[in-house]
Image (cartoon, rainbow, N blue to C red):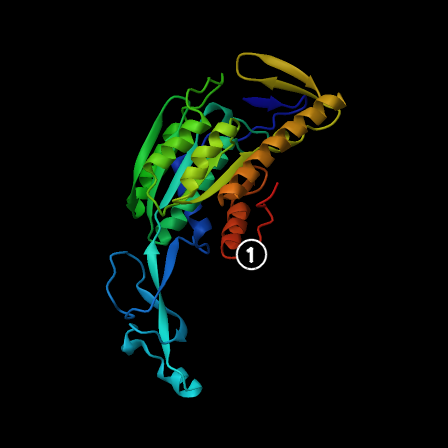
Amino acid sequence: MAIINNNRSLVDGPYISVDALLRLRYLGNDLTLDTRKKSLASGDGDARTNFRGRGMEFAEVRLYQPGDDIRNIDWRVTARTMDTYTKLFQEERERPVFLVIDQRSPMFFGTKQVFKSVYAAQIAGVIAWVAMQNNDRIGALLFGDHEQKDLRARRGKHAVLGLLNQLQQFNQQLSSPVAPCSISAQDILSDVRRVARPGSAVFIVSDFHDFDEDCEKPLTQLARHTDVSLFHVFDPLESHLPSAQKLSVSNGTERLTVDTAAGQLTKMFQTQFMQQQQRLHHACRNCGSRYVRANIATPVANLMHDVFLSRRGKRSPQGDAP
């Protein structure tokens, strides 16, 4: 779908390419995904583990308890306090990265430099490159109007390249006129719950235009066993109509002129968007998931930098709140 101003076209960049996604690799050079689950243990620091990670690292000391390995007694702290203390270690366990990318027709819209579908692909591309640098396994589910593609989690550059090629294929199938969707947000969340491995870091990138009460249950079930982040992709025009302008709206077959000078229409439009945004945010908060506002007017490099900084404990200006 396109929105055309009376004076000039605002749409530039409706499609993504593998070459463009390859260039995103350099955006992730200074970013790190926090995809390692850590558990405290008082075992030997170089003990073997069934979980792949970076081994064991020192965490803290505590008073010695019966059954602790005497090889882990911290003799310096013991001598200083006259009480016996044991070293505790952190075991790093792998947390696979699982990407869910919406490429349905409602995503084929934009009034800025890119369409929502392209912006979603860029977000997924950056996360995939960062995950590769972190040596994480990367899996994905891609959704179109009537089809989906399940990419099993793999590690390395070939896994990322396979994802990027599939992203390009799904993205370039989008066109006007906008087609009706046979796959709903509820279907997407239910399928993700089915294929995402417990403990995975799940990133769902969509405009969530059809997220409703029926979606909250599968989201909650998914969040019980995975670390979920929702990237709510939207165009600025969807959140706030420009005042006192006549906009020509087209879905590829029909055209409609909207007069935003009608204050009641503008207010209703803005209220509807805010209600949907709040529904998403509240659903995420209730199940312990992460909500990220992804305004396509924000350069994807800035958005991802803020998000990853926030995941390391700093607040993101893009927001966890509407």
Q: Nearer the viewer, residue 143 or 177?
A: 143
> Could you tell whether 305 is left or right of 197 in the image?
right
| Residue farthest top in this picture | 254
Q: Quadrant of the C terminus?
A: top right
Q: Please name the residue that numbered disc 1 is placed on.
A: 314
Query: Could you tell me which residue is drawn at 28 percent across and 56 percent down?
Result: 52
> Looking at the picture, how far across and down is residue 212, in whole percent?
52, 28
> Could you tell whether 123 is left or right of 260 in the image?
left
The quarter of the displayed image where residue 285 is located: top right
Q: Height in image: 33 above or below 172? A: below
Query: Could you tell me which residue is drawn at 74 percent across and 22 percent down?
Result: 264
Q: Height in image: 93 above or below 81? A: above
> Looking at the picture, how far across and down is residue 311, in whole percent?
50, 53
Q: Amino acid at mark 1?
A: Lys
> Looking at the picture, how far across and down is residue 287, in whole percent?
49, 42
> Could you tell whether 219 is left or right of 150 in the image?
right
Q: Nearer the viewer, residue 5 or 321?
A: 321
Query: Could you tell me which residue is drawn at 65 percent across and 23 percent down?
Result: 5
The quarter of the displayed image where residue 164 is located: top left
Label 1 neighbourhood size at 10 Å, few (<14), some (14-19), many (20+)?
few
Residue 217 visible: yes
